[in-house]
Image (spheres, helix red, strand yellow):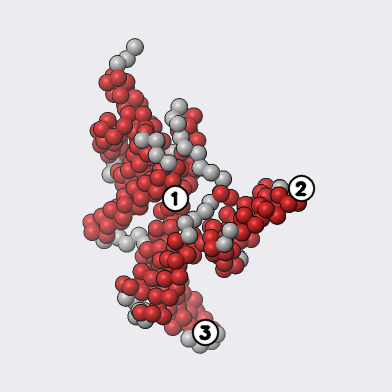
């Protein structure tokens, strides 16, 4: 039987090989790369969950080096993006942390790794990946404006509207970036945690979405953000204005999710079929403003308790 050190080395070599193959497939194999990228954190997470922090640090360095040797410089950024995420997931499982801690630590690890690579791309390659979609939108808008002007149908104030729209999107980039990273982290956990559970790890299970309940302090944060522009009169384009705008976007998304969670809770309490929850989720998107108000009411008042009491009274 292998001793503990030999097992660590053997398992490390196996997981590193799997990670390198998945990374190479994610970079060089079209179509398959979408699937392989979802499971990139699995070997890192399994090893760190099994052997802890000290062995995982050496394993992560070896995996990154092997990725560079086998996959080249093109594969290294992807490896350096998902290795911290896998370590955060695995070490959280190893330490038997809660599901919320696991999600937050993994999402923050992915966020920091993404920011570091973004800064590196700007400094070394002079490429701003975040601004590229905005620049393309500006160019498309200008092309549409030029064409409409040639045809004599350019709306009055179109140029100012386009400039304001592009500027607003630029100001909202930080919140869009953060929300996108957290969404990616959630999708990765959704794909990877079941596999880690099948590999023998004691993976924490996330509760049903209908049980989501944000802290009530979110309402106070939202109130402060709403009143800030009227109390302090921030100038558009300043750092303070951008901070308030992005905080508002993030809080509105959270309240929207709280409202959707209440829809799911109500449908479950009524015993309606599961497809009705899916339908309610899709309908919540065009009704985002109303759903956000539902989220505020759900947080501020115990309407779930009222729904539960009404349901129990009907059963009696």
Quadrant of the drawing holding the N terminus: top left
At a point 54% along the width and 63% down the height, the residue shown is: 300
Helix or strand or loop: what does disc 1 sit on?
A: helix
Q: CA distance from mark 2 to mark 3?
A: 65 Å
Residue 235 locus on image (x, y percent): 34, 80
x and y, in percent, of residue 117 in the image? 29, 52
Q: To which quarter of the image does residue 208 belong?
A: top right
| Mark nearer the viewer, 3 or 1 | 1
Q: Which residue is mark 3?
A: 154
Residue at point 36%, 74% (across, down): 241
- In the rendered structure, the answer to whether residue 294 lies left or right of residue 5 reads right
- Nearest the viewer among 107 and 143 is 107
| 218 to the left or right of 264 | left
Residue 21 visible from this viewpoint: no
**Which of the two discs, 2 and 3, labels the residue nearer the N terminus?**
3
Name the residue rendered at 35%, 41% in the picture: 88
For disc 3, the neighbor class at 10 Å (few under 14, some 14 to 19, many from 20) is some
User: Which element type, helix, strand or loop, lies under badge 3?
Assistant: loop
The residue at which mark 2 appears reads as 316
Residue at 38% of width from left, 80% of height from top?
231
Does residue 293 show up? yes
Residue to which mark 1 is pinned: 184
- Label 2 neighbourhood size at 10 Å, few (<14), some (14-19), many (20+)? few
Which numbered tag is attached to residue 80?
A: none
Mark 1 or 2, which is nearer the eye? 2
């Amino acid at each position: 039987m292998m001793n503990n050190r030999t097992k660590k080395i053997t398992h490390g070599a196996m997981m590193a090989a799997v990670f390198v193959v998945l990374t190479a497939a994610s970079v060089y194999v079209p179509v398959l790369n979408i699937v392989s990228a979802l499971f990139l954190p699995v070997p890192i997470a399994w090893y760190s969950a099994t052997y802890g922090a000290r062995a995982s640090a050496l394993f992560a360095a070896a995996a990154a080096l092997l990725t560079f040797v086998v996959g080249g410089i093109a594969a290294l950024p992807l490896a350096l993006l998902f290795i911290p995420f896998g370590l955060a997931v695995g070490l959280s499982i190893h330490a038997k942390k809660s599901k919320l801690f696991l999600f937050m630590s993994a999402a923050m690890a992915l966020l920091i790794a993404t920011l570091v690579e973004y800064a590196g791309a700007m400094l070394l390659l002079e490429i701003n990946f975040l601004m590229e979609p905005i620049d393309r939108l500006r160019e498309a808008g200008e092309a549409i404006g030029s064409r409409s002007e040639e045809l004599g149908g350019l709306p009055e104030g179109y140029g100012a509207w386009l400039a304001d729209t592009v500027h607003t999107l630029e100001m909202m980039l930080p919140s869009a970036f953060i929300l996108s990273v957290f969404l990616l982290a959630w999708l990765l956990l959704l794909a990877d945690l079941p596999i880690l559970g099948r590999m023998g790890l004691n993976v924490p299970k996330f509760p049903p979405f209908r049980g989501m309940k944000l802290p009530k302090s979110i309402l106070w944060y939202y109130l402060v953000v709403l009143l800030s522009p009227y109390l302090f009169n921030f100038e558009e384009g300043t750092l303070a204005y951008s901070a308030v705008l992005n905080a508002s976007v993030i809080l509105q998304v959270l309240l929207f999710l709280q409202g959707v969670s209440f829809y799911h809770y109500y449908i479950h309490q009524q015993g309606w079929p599961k497809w009705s929850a899916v339908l309610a989720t899709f309908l919540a998107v065009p009704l985002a403003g109303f759903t956000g108000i539902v989220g505020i009411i759900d947080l501020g008042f115990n309407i779930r308790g009222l729904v539960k009491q009404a349901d129990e009274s009907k059963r009696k």
